[in-house]
Amino acid sequence: MQYTPKYRRPVFRNQKVRDVCKRALLEKAKAMDIVVGAIEFAPDHVHLFLVNCKNHSASYMTSQLKGYSAYMVRKECWQQIKNYLWGKHFWSGGYFFESVGRVTGDMVKFYIDRQQKKHWQGEDYEYYNVHTKDMPKDQTTLSDFAM
């Protein structure tokens, strides 16, 4: 699952906001008997890898997780987020989810292991897999140069 704050504001640059949101998402998931296999934050969104969630629809999980986490973040981090919000919503209206059955275990592992780096450096699985697998160790790549 991927959830994005309203207007894609970079609210998760603040450590307290990340911590409160993470705690709230984990609490609500546990209450719903859902296992969170991984959770990663970028400055303007969060990714959740949910396991054991076959008893709930994606829309139901999303409404529960986003509702509770928004409540807790607003309650505990109002001073940190008030300048980012316009209106009374914390999360944007949509969400993204993908079934793991459509991707390989290696892709999921890559995604989870490198999530933060990907958002800061533009790295992605296909490029990594195709361009770096057989590359000689001493070959220079464009990413070796500072921009």
Image: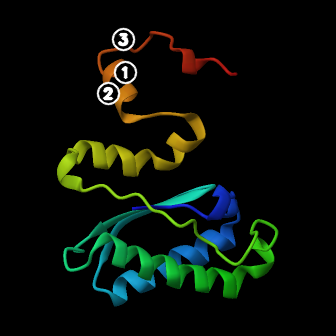
Q: Which residue is mark 1?
A: 132
* 59 horizontally vs 18: left or right: left
Q: Which residue is mark 2?
A: 129
Looking at the image, which residue is at 76% across and 69% down?
A: 86
The residues bearing labels 2 and 1 have C-alpha atoms spaced at a distance of: 6 Å
Q: Residue 70: percent from the left, percent from the top?
A: 58, 79
| Residue type at tag 3 | Pro
| Residue type at tag 1 | Thr
Crowdedness near tag 3: few (<14), some (14–19) or many (≥20) residues, C-alpha within 10 Å: few
Looking at the image, which residue is at 66% across and 72% down?
A: 17
Q: In the figure, residue 52 lies in which quadrant? A: bottom left
Q: Quick one: quadrant of the C terminus? A: top right
Mark before the other along the chain sequence, 2 or 3? 2
Query: Circle 1 sits in a helix, a strand or a loop, which is it?
Result: helix
The residues bearing labels 3 and 1 have C-alpha atoms spaced at a distance of: 8 Å
* 94 horizontally vs 134: left or right: right
**Viewer-proximal residue among 45 and 38:** 45
Q: Which residue is mark 3?
A: 136
Q: Residue 67: percent from the left, percent from the top?
A: 51, 82
**Viewer-proximal residue among 66 and 34:** 66
Q: In the figure, residue 121 lies in which quadrant? A: top right
Looking at the image, which residue is at 36% across and 77% down?
A: 61
